[in-house]
Image (tube, helix red, strand yellow):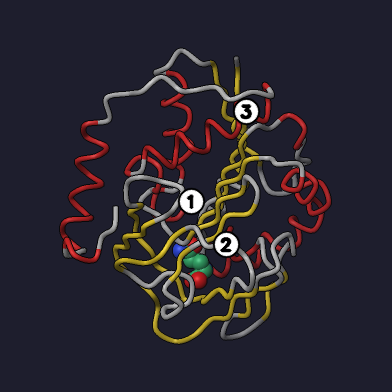
Amino acid sequence: MKLSIGHLYPELFNLYGDRGNVRCLLKRLQWRGIEAEVIPLAAGEKVDFNGLDILCWGGGSDRGQEMAAGYLKEIRKDFKAYVEEDGVVLAVCAAYQLLGNYYRTEKKTIEGLGILDICTQWKPGRLVGNAVLESPLFSTPVVGFENHGGRTEIGDHTPLGRVLFGHGNTGNSGYEGLVYKNLFATYLHGPLLPKNPEVCDGLLERALKRKYGKEIELEPLSDIPEYRANRNIVERYTPPGSRHI
Ligand code: GLN
């Protein structure tokens, strides 16, 4: 077995250590003896989506998003086909916004890929801080760190989770991120995956299932420091009564 992990525009989208998500996916495969490779995909390069099993795309500044918009047009069609054909994607913050129709900043409107029918509007007052979610997809709370000026309306899409602490998609919707097919989009940095091994393994299992056409159960790892880090954030920010998981 071998998985290929694409890292989209790493030079423009790597805020708050989002590159750590790529490292985490790779390590958790290697620890189980599963071969994996990381393919950095530079802006302007042709992207072969057929050769990818997972695509990671991280957070970035408004400026970086504006710079990427032109390059994204070139890969839009193939990217959309990949998502519709159940390709696995982790999109964080700026990437989440750019998967939608547009991100309207204070000064201009940055056109998105339109793969998700969502819209993002900048508003004064950044939404910053630690966040804790409960998600029906995972038995442990999802924790992370958010820092965004954009507010994202997700319409009829399914959110990734309910906000137990933090701001989430708009600051007042009560929900964070979204899940569409095998695409997870979220405002959570951290990086996200090292502190949420269940989310990481969820992505890996989806990628293995898509590639090999059957459920492949991943060998459990001890994950003691990972869950200690997760628990630390949960206990610091959410009173026991507010958690259902
Ligand atoms: N530039 C976007 C915003 O401020 C995304 C920031 C990020 O990726 N953290 O909303």
Q: In the picture, which quadrant includes the N terminus? A: top right
Mark closest to the chain's N terminus, 1 or 2? 1
Distance between the Cα atoms at labels 3 and 2?
A: 22 Å
Q: Nearer the viewer, mark 3 or mark 1?
A: 3
Tell me what residue is drawn at x 68 percent, y 40 percent.
Answer: 87
Residue denoted by label 2? 158
Distance between the Cα atoms at labels 3 and 1?
A: 28 Å
Tell me what residue is drawn at x 52 percent, y 62 percent.
Answer: 159
Instruction: Give the image location of residue 2, x and y in percent.
Output: 60, 18
Position above or below: 137 against 146 = above
The local crowd at label 2, few if under 14, some if 14 to 19, many if 20 or more residues have their Cα within 10 Å, is few
128 or 15: which is nearer to us? 128
Distance between the Cα atoms at labels 1 and 2?
A: 26 Å
74 horizontally vs 177: left or right: right
Instruction: Give the image location of residue 168, x and y in percent.
Output: 42, 69
Quadrant for residue 49, please give it.
top right
Instruction: Give the image location of residue 96, x and y in percent.
Output: 58, 60
